[in-house]
Structure formats: C-alpha cells, structure tokens
Amino acid sequence: MSDDFSNHADHDFRPPVVRRSRTSECAAVIAEVWTLLDGECTTETRDKLRHHLEECPTCLRQYGVEERVKRLIATKCSGDKVPDALRQRLRIQISRTTILRG
C-alpha cells in the first residue's frame, strides 16, 4: 500500500487548520471582554474589540463562552432574594468595619 495520496482523486484532503497563537492583542481583547458584555467600555474600545472579534476566530469563540457564562449566571441568579435577616447582619458588619477602619 502506497502512502502517496496525490493519485487518489476521491480523497478530500484539506490541510490542518493552523490555530492562531495568543498574541498580546488577543490577551488584551480577552481581558476586556467583560466590559464589552456589560456595556461598560467606551465607544472607541467597543469598536476596536468588535473589529478584533470579527477578525480572530479564537477570540470570538472565547467571547461566546463568556457571553454564555454571563447569561447562565443571569438566568440562575435572577430570582434569588437575600433574606432580610442576612441583609441586616451584613449592614451591621459593614458599619462595624467602616467604624473600625474609619
């Protein structure tokens, strides 16, 4: 059996996809993803992030993961209400901490 596949027309050979390595630009984009998701970045930053995401499938995939995590948290935690007793204990503890440090 020959290892030469060039003579086999029925093989649909595609070269492996070369994954883009994380550059400093990619790291900066991933670090800013939450500001984009939360709508907390400037218009200029938003445009830069979106442009990078359009050009970089690796970062776009990571953005999608972060977006799903945010939705999951919102879905799972949206109905929870802090019990009044806990809320009162937290207020007391915060005021004690503020007085001690103040």
Image (cartoon, rainbow, N blue to C red):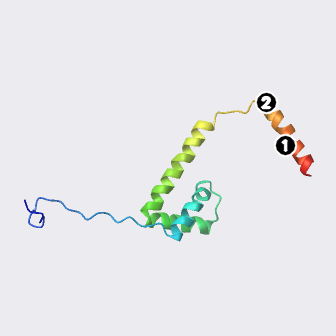
77 horizontally vs 22: left or right: right
| SS label for mark 2 | helix
Mark 2 nearby-residue class (10 Å; few <14, some 14–19, many ≥20): few
Please, what is the three-letter code of the amino acid marked with disc 2? Answer: Asp
Q: Earlier in the sequence, mark 2 or mark 1?
A: 2
Counting every numbered tag in the picture gives 2
Which residue is label 2 attached to? 84
Relative to 88, is 20 above or below? below
Mark 1 nearby-residue class (10 Å; few <14, some 14–19, many ≥20): few
- Which x, y percent locates residue 100? 91, 47
Answer with the quarter of the image where residue 57 lies.
Answer: bottom left
Q: Residue at x 53, y 70 (%)?
A: 24
9 horizontally vs 40: left or right: left
- Which x, y percent locates residue 99? 92, 47
Relative to 43, is 97 above or below? above
- Which x, y percent locates residue 19? 38, 64
Q: Nearer the viewer, mark 2 or mark 1?
A: 1
**CA distance separating discs 2 and 1:** 15 Å
The quadrant in which the N terminus is found is bottom left
Q: Nearer the viewer, residue 1 or 86?
A: 1
Relative to 12, is 78 above or below? above
Q: Residue at x 80, y 29 (%)?
A: 85
Please, what is the three-letter code of the amino acid marked with disc 1? Answer: Ile
Q: Residue at x 58, y 61 (%)?
A: 31
| SS label for mark 1 | helix
Q: Nearer the viewer, residue 3 or 18?
A: 3
- Residue at the far front in the pictured view: 1
Answer with the quarter of the image where residue 90 lies.
Answer: top right
Which residue is label 1 attached to? 94
Q: Residue at x 79, y 34 (%)?
A: 87
- Which x, y percent locates residue 95? 88, 43
Q: Nearer the viewer, residue 20 or 77?
A: 20
